[in-house]
Image: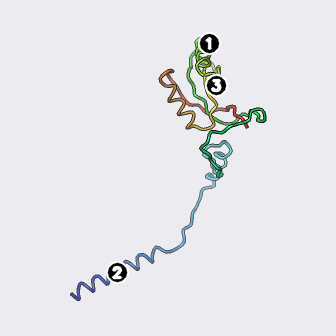
Amino acid sequence: MIKKGFIVSCLFFLSITLVKAQEGKVEVVKDSLISLLQEYRAYYAINPTTSKVVSLEPKTIDKSRASRVKVRGFRVQIFSGSNRNEATNVQNSFIRQNPDVGAYLDYVEPNYRVKVGDFTSRSQATDYMRQLRGTYRNVFVFVEDVWTWQ
């Protein structure tokens, strides 16, 4: 019985000693490139480091007082090919079905590309891309300058 008490007492004191050994200061060493990356992401509104109040309500903009500005954002490509007539047809068809979404035709040699939408977040563009996958083939999200209201 005395032997069990002695062993339990030793284990108890040993555990107290180990807990005290974990006291101390923690020093965080941060690479200088992390600060540059955070500033870059904040500038282009990619997971900004500054805290913002986020509202789940839809944002309403008084367009008579607002101005359109270009910001870094995302578009969904719905067509890429060398035939200009086919690209124009895809663009016009999309505009007829979605008059409230912008459709843009670009030419980067040797292909014409039709990209749609002006999204400020990748998640919005990805959600829209998933909606379009059943209608268009080779649908991708691209980072580029987009129009938004401010």
CB atoms of marks 1 and 2 within 8 Å: no
Label 1: which secondary element: helix
Q: Residues within 10 Å of mark 3 (few under 14, many from 20)?
A: few
| 6 or 149: nearer the viewer | 149
Q: Read off the residue under disc 2.
A: 12
- Between the residue at mark 1 and the residue at mark 2, the CA separation in whole angstroms equals 81 Å
Relative depth, front residue between 62 and 126? 62
Q: Estimate the x, y position of residue 34 in percent, counting from the top left.
A: 61, 52
Which of the 4 image quarters holds residue 125?
Answer: top right
Q: Is residue 71 visible?
A: yes
Residue corresponding to mark 3? 100
Crowd class of label 2 (few under 14; some 14 to 19; many from 20; radius 10 Å): few
First along the sequence among labels 1 and 2: 2
- Lower position in the chain sequence, tag 1 or tag 3: 1
Q: Under tag 3, what secondary structure?
A: loop
The tally of labels here is: 3
Q: Name the residue tied to disc 1.
A: 84
